[in-house]
Image: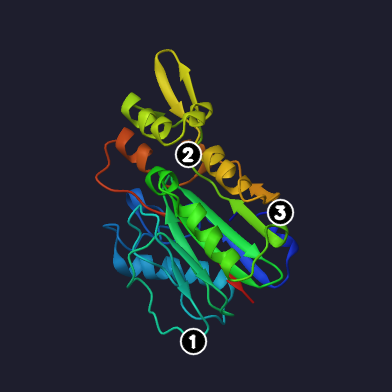
């Protein structure tokens, strides 16, 4: 498990970016696969989720997850909300509930954990390229600001994801981002006739637009095998028919 140094300064929350070690799953899902939508044994997935929950807080309720769809949509779970886990198709969760762990699942996409220490509001975002391009980060931050959060009180932790040296893309992919904003060209590099995309820094730039200075980045490339993360692109490389998911979680104590 990896922790954000900046988020760790706050005693009112607990969080973690988990790799694939420390679980019970076997084979290509070895071992801490938390992907409920994967083809892994469901009993093992439940055991893995319990392992994660216990590392964050043994006495909290079950981890709240959503059906991730690579969108720019989010859900706010208030103190009196009766929404149950995995019933909403969105890619981010915002809450002010205590002892209510929220989490997102990734396998190269970017997990983002957010905390405003004055309003005591947290968020967890799953940001793939589609969600990032269509404004998932912007939508979440704007909602949090409507709830009274302030940029100076907000800390954003960008978790382990695929890095610019591993994220090879096609020309039509690049064109989508340039069409959105010509300045997005700075997030691409050409190397030996190949194009690479810097997704984490693209997201970091989206956060900076909101004048947030407290940004932390866990610089771990999920595609590199020795880093021990589940990776969708790695599964394609090795011709696996599925892959596990890493979990990133945050909770107000």
Quarter of the picture containing the N terminus is bottom right
Q: State how far apart marks 3 and 2 are (Cα).
A: 20 Å
Q: Is residue 82 above or below residue 157?
A: below
- Mark 3 or mark 2: whose residue is earlier in sequence: 3
Q: Which mark's residue is nearer the viewer, 2 or 1? A: 1
Q: How crowded is mark 3: few (under 14 residues within 10 Å), some or many (20 or more)?
A: few
Q: State how far apart marks 2 and 1 are (Cα).
A: 37 Å
Of all residues shown, which one is farthest toward the top? 192
Q: In this view, does 133 lie above or below 84?
A: above
Q: How many labels does the image show?
A: 3
Q: What element carries label 2?
A: loop
Which residue corresponds to mark 3?
A: 5
Q: State how far apart marks 1 and 3 are (Cα).
A: 31 Å
Q: Is residue 90 above or below residue 191?
A: below
Q: Which mark's residue is nearer the viewer, 1 or 3? A: 1
Rendered image: mark on residue 162: 2
The answer to whether residue 63 is seen in the rendering is: no
At x 57%, y 76%, the residue is 96
* In the foreground, 78 or 157: 78
Quarter of the picture containing the C terminus is bottom right
* In the foreground, 96 or 210: 210
At x 63%, y 64%, the residue is 115
Q: Residue 49, how many percent across, how many down?
A: 44, 68
At x 45%, y 50%, the residue is 135
- Mark 2 or mark 1: whose residue is earlier in sequence: 1
Q: How crowded is mark 1: few (under 14 residues within 10 Å), some or many (20 or more)?
A: few
Q: What element carries label 1?
A: loop
At x 41%, y 42%, the residue is 129
Rendered image: mark on residue 80: 1
């Amino acid at each position: 498990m990896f922790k954000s140094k900046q988020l760790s300064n706050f005693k009112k929350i607990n969080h973690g970016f988990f790799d694939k070690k420390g679980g019970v799953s076997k084979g290509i899902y070895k071992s801490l696969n938390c992907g409920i939508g994967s083809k892994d044994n469901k009993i093992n997935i439940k055991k893995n989720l319990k392992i994660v929950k216990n590392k964050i807080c043994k006495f909290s309720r079950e981890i709240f997850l959503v059906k991730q769809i690579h969108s720019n949509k989010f859900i706010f779970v208030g103190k009196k909300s009766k929404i149950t886990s995995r019933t909403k198709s969105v890619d981010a969760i915002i809450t002010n509930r205590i002892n209510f762990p929220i989490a997102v699942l990734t396998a190269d996409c970017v997990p983002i954990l957010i905390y405003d220490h004055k309003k005591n509001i947290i968020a967890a975002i799953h940001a793939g390229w589609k969600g990032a391009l269509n404004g998932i980060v912007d939508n979440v931050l704007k909602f949090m600001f409507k709830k009274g959060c302030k940029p100076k009180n907000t800390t954003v932790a960008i978790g382990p994801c695929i890095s610019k040296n591993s994220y090879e893309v096609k020309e039509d992919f690049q064109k989508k981002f340039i069409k959105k904003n010509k300045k997005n060209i700075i997030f691409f590099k050409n190397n030996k006739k190949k194009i690479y995309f810097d997704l984490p820094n693209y997201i970091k730039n989206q956060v900076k637009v909101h004048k947030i200075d407290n940004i932390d980045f866990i610089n771990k490339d999920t595609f590199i095998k020795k880093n021990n993360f589940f990776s969708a692109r790695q599964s394609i490389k090795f011709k696996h028919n599925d892959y596990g998911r890493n979990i990133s979680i945050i909770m107000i104590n």
